[in-house]
Image (cartoon, rainbow, N blue to C red):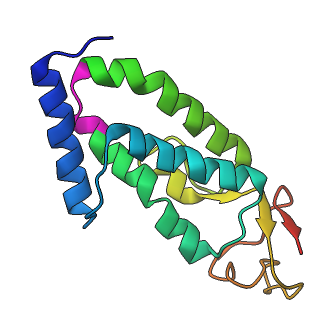
């Protein structure tokens, strides 16, 4: 797909707007935002080894993509949508939704937990979560596997 000069400028402006709102000084591109999301999803698929607050922070790349997506020219969105949809589908497959939350509304990615958690200790919270995940206010779903 060939972009017009106006579309290129619109993409660059959208990226600058979103990167600036995140306080990012490093050079960001549409590709880099998608790559960050893809890399996080790969890490979650393999077994996420950090804490719930870290995951929340890491998910900022998907939140930034949501903001960026609204600012992109329609042709760019349409062209790149299948790529985003595929990464999103992998994330949904590698995670479990929070009980009682609609998985289709708003920032759905913030209300999911990895199916595989790599824990550094065998200690568990009263709800069955490993250390670093005890902030979860619901019992650990059976579909979540914890490896030590």
Whole-percent x, y for residue 14 in the image: 19, 41
Say whether residue 62 is left or right of residue 136. left
Whole-percent x, y for residue 97 in the image: 65, 53
Q: Residue at x 71, y 63 (%)?
A: 48
Q: Residue at x 72, y 47 (%)?
A: 94
Q: Is residue 32 above or below residue 27?
A: above
Q: Residue at x 10, y 22 (%)?
A: 6
Which is more toward the observer, 72 or 13? 13
Say whether residue 119 is left or right of residue 44. right
Residue extent of the magenta highlight: 69-74
Dividing the picture into quadrants, the one containing residue 131 is bottom right
What secondary structure do most residues of the magenta stretch adopt? helix
Say whether residue 99 is left or right of residue 21. right
* 4 within the magenta span: no
Whole-percent x, y for residue 99 in the image: 67, 58
Q: Residue at x 15, y 15 (%)?
A: 4
- For the N terminus, the image quarter is top left
């Amino acid at each position: 797909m060939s972009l017009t000069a106006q579309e290129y400028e619109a993409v660059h402006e959208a990226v600058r707007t979103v990167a600036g709102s995140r306080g990012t000084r490093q050079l960001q591109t549409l590709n880099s935002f998608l790559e960050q999301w893809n890399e996080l999803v790969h890490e979650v698929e393999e077994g996420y080894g950090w804490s719930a607050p870290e995951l929340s922070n890491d998910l900022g790349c998907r939140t930034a993509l949501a903001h960026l997506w609204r600012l992109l020219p329609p042709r760019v969105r349409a062209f790149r949508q299948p790529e985003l949809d595929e990464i999103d589908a992998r994330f949904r497959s590698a995670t479990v939704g929070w009980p009682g939350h609609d998985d289709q509304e708003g920032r759905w990615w913030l209300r999911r937990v990895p199916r595989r958690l790599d824990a550094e200790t065998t200690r568990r919270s009263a709800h069955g979560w490993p250390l670093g995940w005890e902030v979860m206010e619901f019992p650990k779903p059976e579909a979540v596997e914890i490896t030590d």
